[in-house]
Amino acid sequence: MRSRVRAAGHAVHPILIVFPLGLLTTAVGFDVLHLVTGRESFQFTSAHLIAAGVLMGVLTAATGWLDWLLVVPRGTRARRIGLLHGLVNATVLVLFAVSWLLRLAEQDWAPTWPALIAAWLGVLAGGLGGWLGGELVERLGISVEEDANPDASSSLRGVAVSGR
């Protein structure tokens, strides 16, 4: 089933997921560095990575919801898994947003234990959301071209190249 939100011959949602995933996971890494070293620069960096990750997550979620609404057939297992995937990942964004708000209330973006726990739960939930996304693509064939095969033509076939 071909994604409707596309760029340069590919679905946009799988391209964008690396940004919130990387930013939010790295934020938790900086939290751990802060806990180990006590350096304020790590807590500051973590808070800003969370802000960027949540913003990118909202954009990424929008592309996923559009595909879910426009592409995934109603009444299918893929529709149910897609809904669960979206809800789990929305929960991830909420957990990280809560973590960010809790940090905002502190001097120098210091992460309180509730802020840290919200972020750690967000990473765990992100793992579940990622697994569900993998199930959609690898098992249920969502956003996979119908004629995909080891010798398929380039995805850029038929895409206009600017400047030519």
Image (cartoon, rainbow, N blue to C red):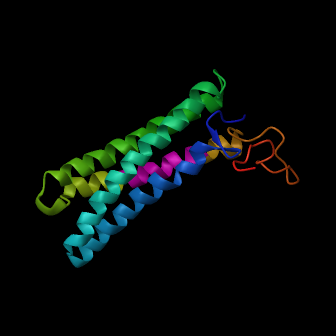
- In the image, taking residue 112 as reference, residue 9 lies left or right, namely right
Q: Residue 140 occupies which quadrant of the picture?
A: top right
Q: Residue 136 occupies which quadrant of the picture?
A: top right
Residue 92 image position (x, y, % from top left): 39, 45
The magenta span reads 122-133
Q: Is residue 80 in sight in this rendering? A: no
* Residue 123 covered by magenta stretch: yes
Q: Residue at x 76, y 48 (%)?
A: 156
Q: Nearer the viewer, residue 48 or 22?
A: 48
Residue 153 image position (x, y, % from top left): 85, 49
What is the residue that sits farthest to the top in this orientation? 75
What is the residue that sits farthest to the left in this orientation? 107
Q: Residue at x 48, y 54 (%)?
A: 19
Residue 145 image position (x, y, % from top left): 77, 40
Q: Looking at the figure, which quarter contains the N terminus?
A: top right
- In the image, taking residue 155 as reference, residue 6 lies left or right, namely left
Q: Is residue 128 in sight in this rendering? A: yes
Q: What secondary structure is the stretch in magenta mostly built from?
A: helix
* Residue 97 covered by magenta stretch: no
What is the residue that sits farthest to the right in this orientation? 151
Residue 62 image position (x, y, % from top left): 49, 35
